[in-house]
Amino acid sequence: MAKICIYGAGSIGCYVGGRLLAGGSDVSFIGRARMADQLRSHGITLSRHDDSRWHVPPELIDVSTDAASAAAADLVLVTVKSAATRAAAAELASVLRPGTIVLSLQNGVGNADVLRVALPQNIVLEGMVPFNVVERGPGAFHQGSAGELEVRHTPAMQPFVDAFRQAGLPLIQHVDMLPVQWAKLLLNLNNAINALANRPLKEELSQRAYRLCLGMAQKEALALLKRAGIRPARVTPLPATWIPHVLSVPDALFERLGRTMLTIDPLARSSMSDDLAAGRATEVSWINGEVVRLAQRLGQTAPVNERLCELVREAELADVRPLWSGEALLAEMQAAANAALALHRTV
């Protein structure tokens, strides 16, 4: 049986790895001491928004804090935060066998490139996790929204397709993952808004002012993607270009339309909101920051996403976590856009 290693035993890593383990695959985990201790004591308990549940007892879990345990793996799923990608790549470069497949299941659009540079003897693939996972307690992880895993197609990945299917995590494969990654990133632009709102996702998205903030961030990104010649893939029932318009409709209408776009658990929050709550650095530089960097490469600006980056970084450093109302945050986004427009007119 092929060996699968999860490098990054956090919420996503434990959920995907736990599902694979529950489905009968040979799975090991590499993570920090805190999580390793929890898995050894409690095992892994998984749940999903549709009330499905799985449990793997502690005695069946192989978990280590040492990257050397990835040496025997045939497939490594990298699920660390984007800021840790370079360090992960360096550790894996010293232990992986040539030909081992490395699949990045991370936010942003550039992590696989970082891994690829450090791992020239390995097959590095881009992947995308569309759903939200929250840690509910020691060893307990909950999938709070719907979606299927998406990965770059390559013949080398085919021996593992059945393992994911048996785990109930069928892989959607694409020849080109960049449009898929950008489509996910467009949705993830809400992570910063949700973190600043400090509310569950469903509650935040039920308020039009917050949705208008997201619509502004998405419109800004879509204009830049069009200029760059990148057409986002369709990862929701609606095309990416339609979503900002749907976000602007009245609350009652959006409640009906939203149910056709994405299933969200009432208690789910974005991973960025969870990071702020835990006092951890966020991934805003690899989400909204990607839009800012794209603008810079094109000689343009992205004032809305740049301001969201600034506000999240300020929240990371704040003694008391801010709680932005939708109206106040929208006014902040509009002021940033208007200031950039005024500056452009004077140049």
Image (tube, helix red, strand yellow):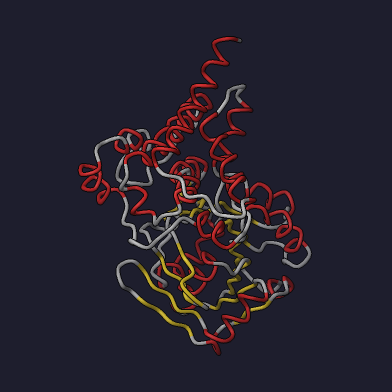
Q: Please state the horizontal and vertical placement of residue 251, each as a whole percent of the image.
A: 25, 42
Q: Residue furthest bottom?
A: 59
Q: Is residue 314 above or below residue 101?
A: above
The image quadrant of residue 165 is bottom left
Most distant residue in the right direction: 94
How many labels were placed on the picture?
Answer: 0
For the C terminus, give its image quadrant: top right
Which of 165/312 is in front? 312
- The image shows residue 97 at horizontal and vertical percentages of 72, 66
From the image, which quarter does the N terminus lie in?
Answer: bottom right
Q: Give x and y (percent) for residue 213.
A: 42, 37
- Please name the residue shown 72% across and 66% down the image: 96
Q: Image quarter for residue 312?
A: top right
Q: Is residue 233 left or right of residue 258?
A: right
Q: Position of residue 27 (x, y in %)?
A: 56, 76
Residue at image point 58% right, 56% down: 104
* 203 over 8 or under it: above or below: above
> Residue at image x 63%, y 28%?
296
Nearer the observer, 132 or 269: 269
* Residue at point 59%, 32% (across, down): 294
Above or below, 286 relative to 23:
above
